[in-house]
Amino acid sequence: TTNRSAPVSVSGISSATQINAGSGGSHSCALLSNNTVQCWGSNGYGQLGDGTTTNRTTPVPLSGISNATNVAAGEGHTCALLDNNTVQCSGRNDTGQLGDGTTTQRTTPVAVSGISTATAVANGSYHTCALLSDKTIRCWGYNSTGQLGDRTTTNRSAPVQMQF
């Protein structure tokens, strides 16, 4: 928990292929070469996905994820794109940012409703979007300024298609 003015190695991470830091600096996650995800930092909402809400100063595995191809960290939530083109998310869910059709906080990853052809995933502060194989975009979560792209300002707890 010591502030550093120079880079330091992350304990236990030696085969990262991707890194993502949650907005607001709350937590970080790494996708490893064996397709698992490890996260560390703030965990007050279960965003580290280890089944707890305990903050971690060293990386812990995102529970049940062994086939990830991408990881995205938001403000209190984490999502992983899996090699079967589905997305699973954990953590804060008060505005539906986990996409499971609820607003229930989750300390382990849950499947995003209706997403089976995702090719990329990205988290905003309180929302998430997935690019699908047909080149459409589905988003869910906080929508106060229209960030889901569905021409509304209604929060969505399940994915909606972005309108162009």
Image (cartoon, rainbow, N blue to C red):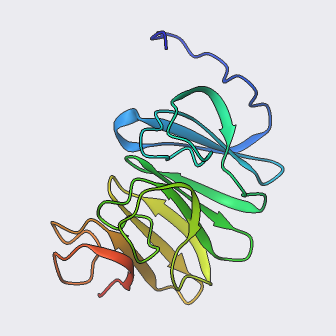
Q: Image check: 35 left or right of 156? A: right
Q: In the current view of this chain or complex, which residue is farthest to the right?
A: 34
Residue 22 in picture, x, y percent from top left: 44, 43
Is 50 in front, or is 58?
A: 50
* Occupied quadrant, residue 3: top left
Residue 137 in picture, x, y percent from top left: 44, 80
Q: Image check: 96 left or right of 70? A: left
- Whether residue 65 is situated above or below residue 41 in the rendered picture: below
Name the residue rendered at 56%, 44% in the picture.
Answer: 48
* Occupied quadrant, residue 64: bottom right
Name the residue rendered at 40%, 63% in the picture.
Answer: 104
- Whether residue 71 is situated above or below residue 17 in the rendered picture: below
Residue 117 in picture, x, y percent from top left: 62, 84
Name the residue rendered at 31%, 60% in the picture.
Answer: 94
Is 136 in front, or is 140?
A: 140
Name the residue rendered at 74%, 31% in the picture.
Answer: 13
Is 104 in front, or is 11?
A: 104
